[in-house]
Amino acid sequence: MTKRILILNGSPKQNGGTSRFISKLIGVQLAGSHVEYASLRQKSAHADIVRRLSDIDVLVIASPLYVDGIPSHVIEFLQAAEEFCTHNACRFTVYAVSNNGFIEGSHNKSHLKMYECWCRRTGAVWGGGLGIGGGEMFHCLAVYYPIAFAVLIAVNIVKYAAGAVPALSDWRPLAQNIIIYLFFNCGVFYCTARLAAHIRKLRPAKNRFTRVMVPAFLFIPMADIFMILTSLFHGKNIFTLLKKDEYCGEKKGSGADKVQESVLSR
């Protein structure tokens, strides 16, 4: 019997980010099953997704770690889903994948535990989870290396069209990039493949934790630079980031200060 699997992307980002990539990565490893995808980003889509829970065998949630727990929009979905499952006796199996910006995958423990507790409340079966450290870097590498591969192949095609015969050494950078990419992400690929195998067989899996294979002393400064550049591209320049909070900048006797005095005097 073909298993019906629903994979949910819990990222609040418009393009899905790392969680979307991980959900697709797991989905392609579930050959032989009927796999559907949905995003929890828009609250307007929650009602339709909740109704689909009565017709599935497996629910997979891929979500980022926010403040050591579940993102608020995913919590809203789980609350609606809990009420629905309680009244409709849903009996699907839940697997979860949590990724964070820290290098250690173990930071995701509390996040996965929350999904396990939710299963106990709803009557769903907890299948197990995977915690991934350095999730944003994993996603960036997944974008960078395919582009590098495509550029290298395009260069060699142009050389061939110009009459030059591509030498074996021309393809050496491509092989090196493949090896580097697989090395950096070998833990993630292995653990997602292992989780997919458990999903296919509907077997419980122990929570596993992995990370991008980059030393912490290199990862931390790289992550700091990446976050600063990301904030700049999203319209937050350095001066805006370092600006004093508006409330902290209020002068004595201002409206906000008077409200505080009024509350304290009661």
Image (spheres, rainbow, N blue to C red):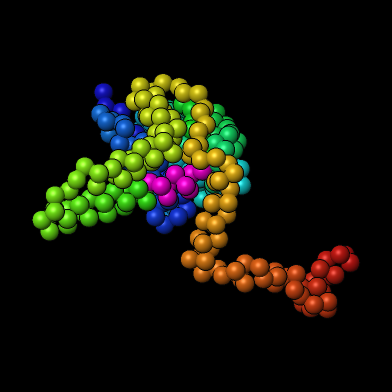
The structure residue drawn at horizontal position 17% and vertical position 57%, both measured from the top left corner, is 158
One can see residue 219 in this view: yes
Q: Position of residue 63 (x, y in %)?
A: 48, 43
Instruction: Name the dominant secondary structure of the magenta segment.
Output: helix
Q: Is residue 160 left or right of residue 94?
A: left
Residues drawn in magenta:
134-142
The structure residue drawn at horizontal position 52% and vertical position 66%, both measured from the top left corner, is 232
The structure residue drawn at horizontal position 21% and vertical position 42%, both measured from the top left corner, is 168
One can see residue 44 in this view: no
Residue situated in front as seen by the camera: 236 or 177: 177
Q: Is residue 140 magenta?
A: yes
Viewport quadrant of the N terminus: top left
The image quarter in which residue 121 lies = top right
Residue situated in front as seen by the camera: 245 or 231: 231
Identify whether 12 is placed above or below 112: below
The structure residue drawn at horizontal position 85% and vertical position 70%, both measured from the top left corner, is 261
The image quarter in which residue 188 lies = top left
Q: Is residue 7 magenta?
A: no
Q: Position of residue 81 (x, y in %)?
A: 47, 40
Viewport quadrant of the C terminus: bottom right
Q: Is residue 93 left or right of residue 172?
A: right
Residue situated in front as seen by the camera: 73 or 161: 161
View extreme (right): residue? 265
